Structure formats: C-alpha cells, structure tokens
C-alpha cells in the first residue's frame, strides 16, 4: 500500500502572540507525509526545493520513512518561504510574506517507481500542476485533493478540471462557501460534490470537520486543547492522517471515511501543540490510538428514550 | 415535575436577507416554555407584558400548556420590543431597536403555587432580577441560567452573585470568552466553572455546543440544515429542551446532561426553520425523537482499530 503526496516543501516562519519559530521545516507535502507515515510505510513525496534546503530537514523526512526520490532539488533557486502571523485567538492569521522561489514554474516529474501509487494526495498547489501529477500516475485507487481561495479565484476553470478527477476534496469552510458561491454549507456541499468529488470534507478549525458523502453527513468534533502553540500545518496533517487511515484500511466507504476523518483530526490536534512539525516527529502509535479514542468519548451520545409528551 | 422559567415575553421584528416577520411572539421565556413543554407538562412562566400584549399570543402560550399565573400584565406600559436584522450568512445579527418598556424596573413576584418548582430556568435578564427569582423559590433541584455580554460588562458583581447559585450556565462562545477574559474555550470553561456553575454549556451556533462537567467534555454537533429562516430564539429553545429533558429524566449526571444537550440542540434546530416560534407550535413528539436520533447518526464514530505502524 502506498501514498503519493505532492505539495510544497518549505521554510516557514511563524509568529504568534505567545512565541515564534524561524525557517522551520514546512509545506503541505512535509506535513502530509509526516502524518501519513504513522499509518503506512510507503510514503512517496513529490515536490521541489532549492539549493538552500538543509541536509538536516532532508534527513528529518528520510528518518520518518518518507521516500524522497520525487523531491527535486533546483540548484539555481531558493526554497519556497512562507511567513505568517497568528492573532490572539489563533483562529485567524495574516500572511506577512510569501516567496514562491523554485515553486514558480514547478513541473513535477513523477519517478517511475511512483506510478503504481494506490492513493494520491494532492496538496494545495496550482490545479494544473495537480493534473500533471494525475496524468503521470497509472490508475490510483483514490485521489484526495486540497485547494485554496487563490486558485478558486484565479484559476477556476483549471480547478474544475482537477475536481472532476478527485474522489475526496478537503477544504475549509470559507473555501467551500467561496467555491460554491453559497453561504449555507449543506447547500454548498451539494454543489461542490456535483463538480466531481464524491466525498467532501469541510474543515472548520477549532469547530471540527464535516464529512459529506452520498449517504450521510458526519460531524467530527475538534479536540479541546488548553494550549495551542501553532496552527500551521494542521490542515495538511489532517489530510495526511485521512489518507493514511484510508490506505491502511484499504476501504473508502462511509465508515472508513468517518474513521479517517477522526485520524485526520487526531493528527491535526497533535500538530498544533508545538511549533512547526515538531510534534509529528515524537509521536508513538499509542499516542495516536489513545487520542482517537478520546474523540469517540468526546462525541459519544448516550442512547435516547423517545419523547412521549404530547403538548396540551 | 415542574419547570419555572423567568425571562422576557416580547414582540420581535425580524429582518433577514430572505424575508421578515413583524411583531411576532418572542422573548426568552416564550421560547424556553414552548420548547420545554414537549418534555414536561408543568411549565410555569414568570415575566411581564404591557397592555398591548394581544390575547392571541397569550392563547398561544396557554394552548401550549404554559401556566401564565406568573405573567404580570402592566396596564400602564407597553410590551418589550426587539427589532433585529440578520446578515447573509445568518451567523451575525445587528439589533436595530430595543424598547425595554415594561421590562424597565420589572420586579418579579413569584406566585405561591410556583415556589416548589423543581427546575428553575433563568432566561437572560438583569442578574439581580435572576437572584430575586431564586430568593422566592423554596429549594429547586437544579438551576439553569443564561446571560449576555451586556450584563458581563455592566453588572459584573451582580452576575457573579447569580453564578454562585447556578448549577448550569448556558452561554455562547463569545460570552464565555468575555466572561472569563480568555480566548481559549477550554481554559475559559475552567475559569467560569470556578465561579459557581458545576456545569457549563457553550453554544456555538452553527458549530454545535460544548458541555463541560467535572468528568468530561462533550462536543455536540449542530444539525446541518439546508434552509435557515430565522435564528431568533434558537438559544432559548436550546435551554428549554435542555431543562425539559433534565426534568423528564429527573437526573442531572453527565449522561443525562449529554442527552439534554442533544434535546436542546434538537429544539434549536427546529426553531430556525421558521420565523418566530412557529415551528415550536407544530411539532409532534415523533418529530423530536426522530431528529434526536439523527443527531446520534450525525456524530457516530465507528469503533477504531489501534494504530500499530511505528514510523521508521
């Protein structure tokens, strides 16, 4: 069982009202891979870095069992850099600086050995690059994709083309509202599923996530944390846990998807506890299993007795 | 088994981008009573209206089995009036006009027959009025209270006095953050429970509700509705369903509280489907039982298999 993930590998600088981190390992492909590897031992990364990408960060990914044959090193450019600042309540952030660097004009070349990947996880990238990747993979069992407002606004046609090839779209609530041009999330979900993805997952940050399939809606809680250090990467770790569980289960039906949303939420809840991907480097399987069980306890509704009172 | 509810009985005028309602029956005590009566046949209302309160609205409450011995009619004044406007996404609203009218200087007098009430539900009112009510009740088994930013900001000492006498506080997330002066809801909940209420319920509108007790946190989903007509009264209907189930169950432990939060959420989900309290007048017990079951389906997490993969 294998997961191919494509996305950014980056330097992140992060400021919060409570602390900061400078040029830590970041990017969607890093977070997806480092989360998914807890569920699957064949994680393949496709991305690009510059000449300044340190051996130490490369080793962090390798030590985590992430295959880097697909990580291109561009000797003429610098690694993608993002600098963001979180506000006091940690729910909103401003981007202070983005340097695309080697990401500009990135044309992924999928190694021969990656072509048989079972699950493909398309991190947030230009939708035409996402399609390029799909074109080079044989016949994946399941395609998961992320996107963002920038592509919804600037490359809507290309995004629609990607969506037609996606099984499961994972976006946040403001992106869902914008993509569907509709404030009500239930109506928006219907509309987005009509664009291609049979399954839609809407991430709501501290409010959990919603899973829409043909048969049902599932509302997953967020883990109530007392101390949130850094929300960066939580959405990508969510996608990593999600993809990881699906590959592990080798099922993509409604129950497998519900469990996968919980494992995604678990991985996101760990990521926010530390700056950068630090917490993803120190977890054991028991940590993950215990927290997943905590999610079940958190959401458990005891059996109900029918209401009989007929008002006067 | 009996519930005493004190709060406003009002005229509401409501504007939404999709329609409007003019001077419909409103107020916290109306919504609480009309929701609670599905669970309990002894609902006692304490409030005040003016000479302009129509017989028709009085009859609506009486037809619902609400005891109005405690509803004072002030012949010299007019009924409390609220006019609000909702925005496109229905999550935010502006108050366009508030006329306190007879509510100004309201000093509730609890009828003799109400003094043995088992559960007291203190709707959002001046905290000193809430205490006045508690002073006139013998020894209630359980006290539920609501409040709002206005009292948190303007009568903090009086509010603290009320809180010491409350078993379960039901407020929304922005109120919780303001009351605790803390953005993180988990930390805020700890702080607020230290002020008196053993149980805290934080309502998050379209994101559901959180229940904090000594032993656990419970995250209840919101019902995913395609069509929200009017959110007015949803929070009060929540309190009504909550109080109603607790009285019906005659239990106040963690499991009873979880179920009560679900029945509160059920009643809130019905209220928003129509303008004013209309939907609360047409429900049958089966509607309520079926929707409560839908909440269980919505939140159900299938059993989980421990994660075994130890990353490289």
Image (cartoon, coloured by chain):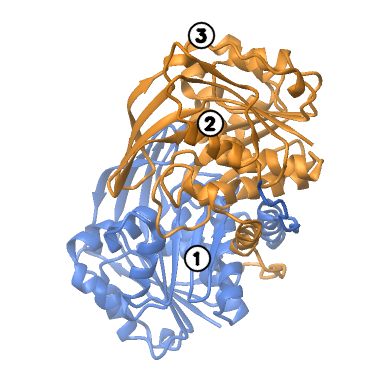
Chain colours: A blue, B orange
* x and y percentages locating residue A291 in the rendered image: 67, 55
CB within 8 Å, label 2 to label 3 = no
Q: Which residue is mark 3?
A: B105
* x and y percentages locating residue A272 in the rendered image: 52, 47
- Residue visible at 30% across and 85% down? A135
Q: Secondary structure at mark 1?
A: strand
Q: Which residue is mark 2?
A: B28
Residues tagged by mark 2 and mark 1 found on one chain of the structure: no
Q: Nearer the viewer, mark 1 or mark 3?
A: 3
Neighbor class of circle 1 (other Cα within 10 Å; few <14, some 14-19, many 20+) is: many
Neighbor class of circle 2 (other Cα within 10 Å; few <14, some 14-19, many 20+) is: many
The vertical placement of B77 against B248, above or below, is above
Q: Which residue is mark 1?
A: A211
Neighbor class of circle 3 (other Cα within 10 Å; few <14, some 14-19, many 20+) is: few
Sequence-wise, the earlier of marks 2 and 3 is: 2
Q: Secondary structure at mark 2?
A: helix
- Residue visible at 64% across and 50% down? B262
| Chain ID of residue with mark 3 | B
Q: Is residue A102 left or right of residue A290?
A: left
Residues tagged by mark 1 and mark 3 found on one chain of the structure: no
Q: Let me know if residue B181 appears in the view.
A: no
Q: Let me know if residue A159 appears in the view.
A: yes
The vertical placement of A65 against A98, above or below, is below
């Amino acid at each position: 069982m294998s997961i191919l993930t494509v996305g950014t590998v980056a330097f992140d600088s992060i400021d919060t009202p409570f602390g900061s981190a400078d040029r830590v390992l970041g990017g969607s492909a890093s977070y997806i891979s480092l989360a998914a590897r807890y569920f699957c031992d064949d994680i393949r990364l496709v991305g690009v870095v510059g000449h300044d990408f340190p051996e130490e960060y490369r080793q962090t990914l390798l030590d985590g069992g992430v295959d880097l044959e697909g990580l291109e090193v561009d000797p003429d450019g610098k690694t993608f850099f993002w600098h963001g600042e979180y506000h006091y309540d940690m729910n909103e952030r401003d981007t202070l600086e983005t340097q695309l660097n080697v990401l500009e004009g990135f044309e992924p070349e999928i190694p021969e050995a990656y072509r048989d990947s079972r699950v493909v996880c398309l991190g947030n990238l230009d939708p035409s690059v996402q399609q390029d990747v799909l074109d080079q993979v044989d016949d994946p069992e399941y395609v998961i994709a992320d996107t963002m407002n920038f592509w919804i606004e600037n490359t809507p046609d290309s995004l629609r083309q990607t969506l037609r090839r996606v099984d499961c779209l994972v976006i946040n609530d403001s992106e869902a509202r914008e993509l569907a041009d509709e404030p009500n999330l239930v109506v928006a979900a219907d509309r987005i599923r009509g664009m291609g993805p049979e399954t839609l997952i809407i991430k709501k940050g501290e409010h959990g996530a919603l899973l829409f399939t043909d048969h049902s809606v599932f509302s997953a809680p967020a883990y109530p944390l007392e101390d949130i250090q850094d929300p960066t990467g939580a959405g990508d770790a969510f996608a990593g846990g999600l993809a990881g569980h699906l590959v592990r289960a080798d099922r993509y039906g409604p129950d497998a998807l519900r469990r996968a949303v919980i494992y995604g939420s678990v991985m996101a809840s760990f990521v926010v506890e530390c700056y950068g991907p630090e917490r993803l480097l120190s977890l054991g399987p028991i940590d993950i299993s215990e927290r997943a069980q905590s999610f079940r306890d958190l959401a458990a509704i005891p059996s109900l007795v029918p209401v009989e009172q007929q008002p006067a």
